[in-house]
Image: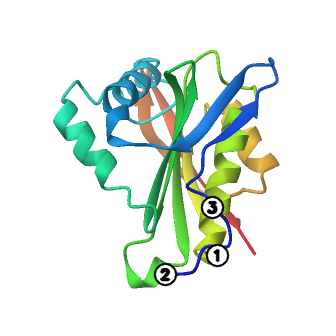
Amino acid sequence: MVAHASNVMRADTVRLKNGRAVTIRPAVVDDAARLQENINSVGAEIDYILIETVGDNLDAEREWIREFDGVSSILLVAEDGGKIVGQADAHVGRSPKETHVGTIGIAIREGYRNLGLGRAMIERLFEWMRDRRLEKACLQVFSTNTRAIALYKNLGFEIEGVRKGQYRIRGELVDDIMMGKWLA
């Protein structure tokens, strides 16, 4: 791909709005159980991410983590006192027609939202994308997740499309909001 202008594979400590210090770093295979616990915790809330559970198969989780090579994809974790409290990933488009686009996914644990952690993690993903000369970032979010939508808009994302009633959450139809941001 591209020579790296910065070391996006570093560990950084960020200070959240509540004063807590959280480390953002690339995930490693030894994070498997704690990553499962984080995603299962966020998924169990039903309202924020598509996945509700990844179960407890550690071998499958380790294999999933190994797929993030730092070149075509990256998986970051946010760690507080040994506990993973957030994760964010990005993938370069797989088709030759979309290799200029990076797709983002993020899951922040209850108690760590609205404190600047999501912003810090996404800005780190932007850094990774720019190092790869990607031109666009995209993501999807439930229309009911108004805090996340506000953050994404604040980071420069625009709504590019809506899939009406795409999901049923707690018995209600919820739109899938597709958002994009040009990185140049």
112 to 116, vertically: above or below: above
Residue 158 visible in the snapshot: yes
Residue depicted at x 44% and y 24%: 38
In front of the other: 16 or 47: 16
Residue type, label 3: Asn
Residue type for callout 2: Met
Q: Position of residue 88 (x, y in %)?
A: 53, 44
Question: Could you say which is closer to the camera, residue 82 or residue 98?
Answer: 82
Q: Kindly identify which numbered label has been placed on residue 7.
A: 3
**Separation of residues labelled 1 and 3 (CA atoms):** 19 Å
Under circle 2, the secondary element is loop
Give the spatial CA distance, label 3 vs label 2.
15 Å
Q: Residue 10 carries which label?
A: none
Give the vertical position of 104 relative to 100 (above or below).
above
Picture coordinates of residue 24, whole percent (x, y): 61, 39
Find disc 2 in the rendering and name its residue: 1
Return the mark for residue 135: 1
Q: What residue type is labelled 1?
A: Glu
Label 1 crowd (10 A; few <14 / some 14-19 / many >=20): some
Vertical placement of residue 49 versus 38, above or below: below
Q: Which residue is drawn at 54% across and 49% down?
A: 140
Which element carries disc 1, helix, strand or loop?
Answer: loop
| Alpha carbon distance from label 2 to label 1 | 14 Å
